[in-house]
Amino acid sequence: MKVIKNKYIKFPSLEDSIGRLGVEFKGNSEAKNDYNDFDLSPAEQQKRIRFFFVMNKLNAKFDETFDPEKILEYLQTALKEIIILKSSFFFVFDENSHLKPVSKTTDKNYTSFINKAYQNGILDWMFETKKISVLPDITRREKNTNALSLLVIPLFMENKPYGLYAIATPIASLSSKTYESDVLKMFLALAQSKIEHARQQERISAVYDDLQTLQSKLSNDYKFSAIGELTAGIVEDVMSPVQVILSCTNFIEKEFTQVDKKLTGAITSQIKKIENVIKRLSKFVGAQPTNGNLYPTIINEQIQDYYEVVLSSLKYNNYECILDLDNNLPPIMTQKSYIHQLLTNLFGMVLNSNVEGGGILVQTKFVSESISLRFIVTDRLNIYAEDNNGNKANLNVKMIANIMKRHQGDVKIINNESGGTTIILNFPVKRKLSK
């Protein structure tokens, strides 16, 4: 008897398999053929083909730039191929949990409306459920125009709220199960990664700029410290020979009466000038507090001391400097070294410029609970330096802004060809407690 073994395994047909698959999808106990449910209509196929073309085009556009303005422009253009929209706005959370628009051209009405909606808890549900919300567009009330809605899509990064994307559209609602919703989320994911990359680049640039500013400030602090340490010995080295010359001049004037009095008088007057310069220098580089504490300081006194020291350099460069100081200024909490560094950077921009000669006005006033220091130059200073990223403030301005930030003050610069340059420093008299 011969046993014949069957080595072939019988599989169900494709039709039966798809039938059972349809049962699993629909939860239906009856086995039926549902493979026709997977077919797409020609219109739906054309829609999805168009989506892939738009997707590839958007990816190519994103690869060309890291500019957030361009990224949002390309995103909005691509979305117009998918849904009807009038405008769109991209918001991200800042360090104070406020929704800040990425684009500088965002309508302020929308920015205010979105932040009020978030602060009032209207958008909390959206971030909790991670679903698209619809808000009425109440920012505009124009006659004879169709009513618009705001489709608000929450954005997340590492499962934390990142921001939101708002679309002004005549569409009253958009289900999260629709094809358009999936495409919208996909496009937003691409744009969000590009925008976050651009923000990281901005943060790195800001940190690098701060590093340069702090390095320059440290260098200035070292120079002030070095001058202070060396001045005591230098003053004695200079004053000792000056005193000898003065004594000899007085001796010659008394013992040799035939010597012209004008000659000895000229020597004596020049020695007095040297003594005054040395005294001013000694006072300027006097001991500064090194514990970081702030003390009540009369800013006019520091300006006057610095003026007497820098006056020789100004005259050498053919600059005339006039002081217009308000005599009724209250003191501010600061250190003398901070005021000296501010003045060093202000006068440094003048003395290091390519312009020879001009006029400078240093003015102080008490205005609106703050002390205003105005530094006015008749010539236009090179406040901004061109680089690959556009116009950026030079190092002197950055250091001034950094010191004013320590004083909870602000800097305002007016720079034009015809009117010269005006730099306004505002020191608040009443300061907030540091956190």
Image: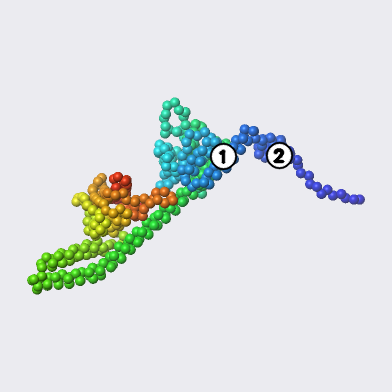
Q: In the image, residue 269 lies at what x, y percent?
A: 15, 64
Q: What label sits on residue 318 in the rendered view?
A: none
Coloring scheme used: rainbow
Q: In the image, residue 318 lies at what x, y percent?
A: 25, 55
The residue wearing badge 1 is 54
As measured in the structure, the alpha-carbon distance from the residue carrying label 2 to the one carrying label 1 is: 32 Å
- From the viewer's perspective, is residue 221 above or below residue 428? below
Helix, strand or loop for disc 1: helix
Q: In the image, residue 127 lies at what x, y percent?
A: 49, 42
Task: State which quadrant residue 142 falls in.
Answer: top left
In percent of the image, x 91 and y 50: which residue is there? 1
Please tell me how crowded label 2 is: few (under 14), some (14-19), or many (20+) other residues with Cα within 10 Å. Answer: some
- From the viewer's perspective, is residue 124 above or below residue 272? above
Helix, strand or loop for disc 2: helix
Give yes or no for contact between labels 2 and 1 (Cβ–Cβ under 8 Å).
Answer: no
Say what amino acid the circle numbered 1 marks: Val
Task: State which quadrant residue 13 falls in.
Answer: top right
- Viewer-proximal residue among 273 and 278: 273
One can see residue 3 in this view: yes
Say what amino acid the circle numbered 2 marks: Ile
Please tell me how crowded label 1 is: few (under 14), some (14-19), or many (20+) other residues with Cα within 10 Å. Answer: some
Residue placed furthest toward the top: 144
In percent of the image, x 43 and y 39: which residue is there? 106
One can see residue 189 in this view: no
Q: Which mark sits nearer the N-terminus, 2 or 1?
A: 2
Which of label 2 and label 1 is nearer to you? 1
The residue wearing badge 2 is 18
Q: In the image, residue 234 lies at what x, y percent?
A: 25, 69
In percent of the image, x 22 and y 65: which residue is there? 278
Residue placed furthest toward the right: 1
- Viewer-proximal residue among 289 and 105: 105
In percent of the image, x 30 and y 45: which residue is there? 418
